[in-house]
Every structure is written in C-alpha cells, then in structure tokens.
Amino acid sequence: MSNTDVINPRRFQLLRTVIPRTENIVSVVILGALALLIIWVATTRDNYDPAFRDIAPELLAKSEADRKLYVPPLKRLADSTPGTQTAAAVPALGLFPGSIVSDGWAIASRVREFDADTLFEKINGEAPKFTKQGFQSLHYVVLASTATDEEIGIELFDQGDKGGSLGIFSDHQSATSQVENANGVTFFRTSIGAIGRRGQYFFRIIGDADTETVQSKAVQIATAMQALRADSEESPPGLALLANGMGVDPQRISFQKANVFKFDFANDFWFGKISDDSNARLFAHEAKSPDEASDLQTRLLDDLGFDLEVVTEADDHTILLHGFLKNYFALGVSDEWVFGVENAESPEDAADAIAKFTEILNGEN
C-alpha cells in the first residue's frame, strides 16, 4: 500500500560528498556580479542628467509650429468646401438602401461583409442558428447621429430564400411581439431598435440607447428595407398550403430548415400556429416524390414511438398521445406531402386537422 503521509518522517540526507570546482567558480562569479550591480545602483541613483531625456531648452524656445516632434503624412487632396463630399469620402453602402442615411444620421463605419466561414467573428455562438437556415452572407454597418452622438448598428442577413429569412424571424419573435407590415417589410419594434425581414433578407437594427431618437430612426431604417431586391413574390408551396388552404394567419407561420422535431433527417418543414390561445401547430413538408414522403413518415413514426403512444392508426395517417404532456400528435401523408399537427388538445382536434389537410390536397390533385 502506498504511503499517503504529507510529512515525510525520514531525515534529510546529503547524497553528494564532493562539489565540483566548476560549480564553485560559477557560484562565486554570480555572487560577484550581483554585488557589482548593487554597488552600481547605489552609487548612480542620484546621477540624473535632464538633458538625457528631457527636450532641449533650445527646442522649447521655438514656436509651436517649428517644434513639432511628429510630422503627419500627406493626405489625398479633397474638396473642403462646406456641405460637399467627394465620392471617395462617403463609404459605399453595398446592399443597404441609400435612404438609411438621412435625418441627421451618417455612416460611421465601412460596410463589413461576412460569409459562412467568418460569420462567427461577428455573432460568435449565434452562427449555427443562421447557417442551419440557409445563411449566405451578412452585411454590417454602423450609423451615427450628428446631433446626439448616438449609434445604430444594422445587421443584414441574406438567408438564401424566403423560408430561411422567415425561419430566423420566427425564432426572434415572442408572445408579446407586435408585428407590423410596411410595403413588403415585416418587422417588430424593440426598446433599442427593430427586427424584421423582406424576401430572403433578415435584419436586426440595434441602437446603443433606449431613446425616442433611436427608436424613430430604427423604424425609418426598417421601412427603408422595402428597397431591397426581394425574391419571387410567389409563396412557397408549404406556406401557401398553410395560409391559403388551412387558413393560418401568415404572421403565425414559420419555417424550420433543419433538425425538425430534433431529428437530423427531417428538414424543410413549414409550421403554422392555429391561434394565440393554443399551442397547437399545423405542419407541412413537400418531399421530392411520394416514395420519399412515405419513407419520411415511416422514419418519423419509428422515432416518435419512443416517447408517444399510438392512439389511432390508418393507412394514410397516425394519431399519437404524449404520455407526459397529455397532448396529441398527428402525422399524415398524401402523395409527396407529409403533414399533421402537434400539441393538439384532443384526438378529435388532431383527426379534424388531418381530414382538412387530406381534403385540400386531394382537391388540388
């Protein structure tokens, strides 16, 4: 058994009986050098020469213009007439609408761009949330008020398509968010800015102060985003199915591009919350073929079976019960569509949703 005593009871023993001459000589040299250093510090501590470090009196006697110690480099010639700016003096705005520079606000930084490899440099831990939703690029600029010195940062994300921007926008919404629409721009206000989307673009406007000036400018910037080139005005099929077919308010529709239901094989699902008073959400996914849709339904049922109990099973749909939450999950398939409802309050509500989905899809065919 090993000895765990902290204090070793054995007495110290000197194992070396001879100290080499070289070691003695080196020790004496080091001690002598330290002694000389101490003597030098003690004898020279008061020998301060002002001329060694201070500016010479002759230089101080010269005028301020003549005694500059640093001469700045030459700058490029520019028109200094008040109220005018050359094109080189105004930073390029890139994708940002030109109307954001107004009302006494000016560009305070160059436009910075980030791709999928550098996105973490700007938003660090948030990057995976955007890349999973089809992130393409991020454009960032800062505006400053010439009157109050307040600043506003604008993050403009290109998410590839309408589904990607809608998915990110839905992640930022809360139960208290009041969504507004202005000429194709959807946004909601925050205490220090605004968050919104247009087409494939998602944006965040973040001020450095909770003031009326910042809030007013944030709304103006959000409205100006209508100048962004939007993708096709035609709604994606999943969005159209929920909004036009199932009657879901477009403001309650969201999109999840990856890891749907926490399964890495489930992607590109549209969700629609039935009402603000209920947690029930309809969902729909368009597969590339009926066989692919059937395979996806089978995989979902296999994995959901670990947590949910089958209540009703038919050829084209299955209704399951969550044993702990006591709500219902229904999953159906029709041609290339996989659809259903989650968090339904009763099996009747789940069956009604499946029946309505089936009726609409069969009517389209």
Image (spheres, rainbow, N blue to C red):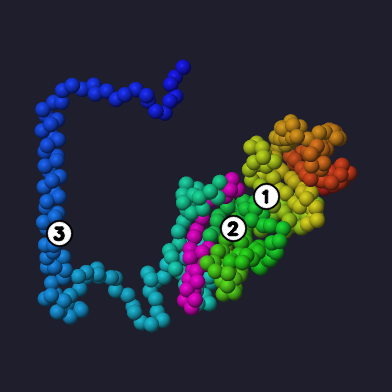
Q: CA distance from mark 2 to mark 3?
A: 67 Å
Q: CA distance from mark 1 to mark 3?
A: 75 Å
* Residue 106 drawn in magenta: no
The kind of residue tagged 3 is Arg
Residues at discs 1 and 2 in contact (Cβ within 8 Å): no
Q: Badge 2 local density, few (<14 within 10 Å), some, or many (20+)?
A: many
Q: Which residue is mark 3?
A: 45
Upstream in sequence: badge 1 or badge 2: 2
Q: Badge 1 local density, few (<14 within 10 Å), some, or many (20+)?
A: many
Q: Kindly identify the residue that appears in the image at 13 percent across and 26 percent down.
A: 20
Number of marks: 3
Answer above or below: position of 40 versus 150: above
Q: Residue furthest bottom?
A: 82
Image position, residue 280 (x, y; %): 79, 49
For residue 68, which quarter of the picture? bottom left
Q: CA distance from mark 1 to mark 2?
A: 13 Å
Q: Which residue is mark 2?
A: 202
Of residues 237 and 62, the one drawn nearer to the viewer in this rendering? 62
For residue 307, which quarter of the picture? top right
Q: Which residue is mark 1?
A: 255
The kind of residue tagged 2 is Phe
Q: Badge 3 local density, few (<14 within 10 Å), some, or many (20+)?
A: few
Q: Circle 3 — which element? A: loop
In the picture, measured across the screen, residue 283 lies left or right of residue 202, that is right
Q: Kindly identify the residue that appears in the image at 79 percent across and 45 percent down.
A: 343
Answer above or below: position of 213 versus 184: below
Residues in magenta, as a range: 129-154
